[in-house]
Image (cartoon, grey):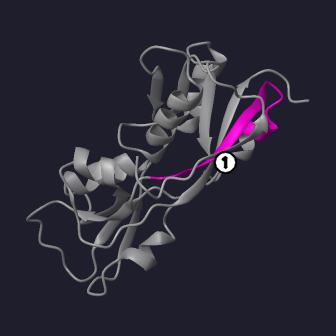
């Protein structure tokens, strides 16, 4: 785990060995997957990690409702996280602070990028673009993706010139960073079935 990793749990009751399976946002390489791996290592039952990766947090929530997962993990940076907090069928099992993998602006090696590139990003980290994009570029068009991994896949397929993505997603999609990188300290919420008290 990176030196910058900071994890702190806050109530109510997620304890070691109580998490049997986790549903969260995928595909592989997302910050959600990395947080799920931490959650499993810290609170999971014994044995290999049981983590289901879904195209959306709503699909991950459906896995909880249909019984294929015991816990749902959602980043509090997600614009619609309130849907899960307000659901009468869910209860907050706990929350933790966890640094994401390094975020940066990535490109497919050898791809010629003009001064006004199209850049793919998940909506949550969009504010980082202004901070991280190298001075020689100005984003001409933002292309939204369902996850940081989906953003990386768009750049790898040359559907966009660049991607704001995480280090694992860049690696999985054979991209290289052209900007400095940095992690984001984020709050992650863990939900279970049950009524909120």
Q: Nearer the viewer, residue 178 or 58?
A: 178
The furthest residue to the front: 3
The furthest residue to the left: 110
Magenta residues (range): 84-100
Task: Tell me which residue sits at (17%, 50%) in the image.
Answer: 174
How many numbered badges does the structure rendering display?
A: 1
> Disc 1 designates what residue?
80
Task: Tell me which residue sits at (50%, 62%) in the image.
Answer: 125
Disc 1, SS? loop
Task: Tell me which residue sits at (51%, 71%) in the image.
Answer: 127
Residue 121, quarter of picture: bottom left
Q: Nearer the viewer, residue 20 or 174?
A: 20
Q: Is residue 36 above or below residue 150?
A: above
* Place of residue 26 in the rendered image (x, y in percent of width and height, measured from the top left): 43, 37
Task: Tell me which residue sits at (31%, 87%) in the image.
Answer: 135
Q: Is residue 73 above or below residue 134?
A: above
* Position of the C terminus by quadrant: top right
Q: Is residue 126 above or below residue 195?
A: below
* Place of residue 95 in the rendered image (x, y in percent of width and height, measured from the top left): 69, 41
Please give left or right for residue 48 compared with residue 118 in the image: right
Residue 118, quarter of picture: bottom left
Please give left or right for residue 172 compared with residue 66 in the image: left
């Amino acid at each position: 785990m990176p030196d910058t990793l900071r994890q702190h749990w806050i109530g109510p009751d997620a304890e070691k060995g109580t998490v049997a399976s986790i549903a969260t946002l995928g595909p592989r390489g997302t910050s959600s997957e990395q947080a799920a791996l931490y959650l499993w290592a810290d609170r999971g039952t014994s044995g290999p990690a049981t983590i289901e990766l879904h195209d959306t947090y709503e699909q991950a929530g459906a896995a909880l409702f249909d019984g294929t997962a015991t816990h749902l993990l959602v980043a509090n940076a997600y614009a619609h996280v309130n849907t899960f907090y307000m659901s009468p069928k869910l209860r907050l099992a706990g929350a933790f602070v966890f640094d994401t993998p390094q975020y940066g602006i990535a490109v497919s090696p050898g791809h010629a990028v003009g001064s006004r590139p199209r850049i793919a990003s998940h909506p949550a980290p969009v504010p980082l673009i202004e901070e991280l994009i190298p001075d020689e570029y100005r984003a001409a068009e933002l292309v939204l993706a369902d996850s940081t991994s989906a953003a990386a896949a768009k750049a790898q397929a040359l559907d966009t010139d660049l991607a704001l993505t995480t280090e694992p997603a860049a690696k999985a999609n054979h991209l290289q960073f052209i900007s400095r990188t940095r992690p984001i300290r984020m709050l992650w919420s863990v939900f279970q079935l049950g009524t909120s008290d």
